[in-house]
Image: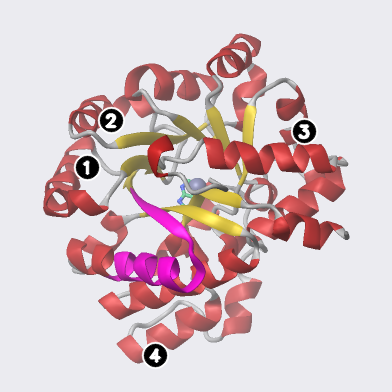
Amino acid sequence: MDLEHFVCSLPKAELHVHIEGTLEPEMMFELARRNGVALPWKSVEETRAAYAFTDLQSFLDLYYAGAAALIHERDFFELALAYFERAHADGVVHAELFFDPQTHTARGVAFATVVDGLERACAEAQVRWGISSRLILCFLRHLSEDEGFATLEQALPQLARIHGVGLDSSERGHPPAKFARLFARCRELGLHIVAHAGEEGPPAYIVDALDVLKVERIDHGVRCAEDPALVERLVREQVALTVCPLSNVKLCVFPDLAQHNLKRLLEAGLKVTINSDDPAYFGGYIARNFIDTARALGLSRAQLKRIARNSLEASFVPESLRTPWL
Ligand code: ES4
Ligand code: ZN
């Protein structure tokens, strides 16, 4: 079997995808036209040409600009349904979607509008493709903890539909400890906890995410390699890392895929997974991430199976609810 077929036929969970990061320029322009929203680009081609990033912030500036096209419940539904269709083609059987409510509520979009649309797509994906899914609310770390608390307040009526919380956006200068009280409250509410850490930020932010926020998985985490004691701990505790190789190259965390540390982390015994992050911006969905990484690093089929298996094991679906392949 060729590599493409092998990768797509592996049942896998996607644990690190920002639904706003699946907004392809074609849909962005269609929604902007439908909603009367002005975009900073003149065409789909000009938009794609602007996707040359130098770091995380240079990406985030464009990502938030693009997200402004999303206004109505139907927009969020169509966005997520298009993602699920691609994910199904890539062999995804379960997806845990990040969403950034603060990006939308700041523009006057109601919190419930976002969740209504996403949840309707989740239900449709279950029916059409048998994909199970979960929603994870991400707090924007460049905003204050108080703004996070205000968002949590808006989320309370929707909490039955939200399974976890995460922390994303600009990492440098915004350590996990800034959100200690907010995440303590989220834990009391019974929410699952994750955080982006060690993408651009130092290994100390990963330690903080574990000890202060008490995360169950680390999003990215690739800079753990700079701290051997931390690597040892992550191996011992089998904390899953949701690694996003194409994202890391696009945002200049590694100069190219051949220099990515994923294979080294995997062979050190870390619970590594492969994910797409913001596939509309970074050049590929989850299967593309698997295939390009496998080729660049020479991952064996046994290693690819291990990575897919890790993703199913690290999902937030309780053991009792797991289908045979989950
Ligand atoms: C993100 Cl790649 C990445 N890192 C941090 N925050 C994000 N939000 C969307 N994509
Ligand atoms: Zn991310």
Q: Residue at x 60, y 50 (%)?
A: 12
Residue corresponding to mark 2: 179
Mark 4 Cα-neighbour bin, 10 Å: few <14, some 14–19, many ≥20: few
Find residue 101 and report its horizontal and vertical position in percent.
28, 57
Question: Does the rendering let one see residue 22?
Answer: yes
From the image, give the main secondary structure of the stretch colored magenta.
Answer: helix
- Label 2 or label 4, whichever comes before in sequence order: 4
The magenta span reads 117-136
Q: Nearer the viewer, residue 278 or 323?
A: 323
Position of 319 relative to 296 (above/below): above
Find residue 28 and report its horizontal and vertical position in percent.
46, 79
Q: Nearer the viewer, residue 262 or 158?
A: 158
Which colour scheme appears in the figure?
Answer: secondary structure
- Element class at badge 2: helix
In the image, which disc is placed on residue 263?
A: 3
Say whether residue 123 is magenta.
yes
Q: Nearer the viewer, residue 63 or 98?
A: 98
**Whole-number angstrom distance, CA of label 3 to CA of label 1:** 36 Å
Position of 37 relative to 317 (above/below): below
Disc number lying in front (4 or 3): 3
**In the visual, does 311 lie left or right of 318?**
right
The quarter of the displayed image where residue 78 is located: bottom left
Residue corresponding to mark 4: 33
- Element class at badge 3: helix
Position of 171 relative to 37 (above/below): above
- Label 4 or label 1, whichever comes before in sequence order: 4
Disc number lying in front (3 or 1): 3
**Whole-number angstrom distance, CA of label 2 to CA of label 3:** 32 Å
Callout 4 touching callout 3 (CB < 8 Å): no
Residue corresponding to mark 1: 148
**In the visual, does 309 lie left or right of 217?**
right
Q: Amino acid at mark 4?
A: Arg
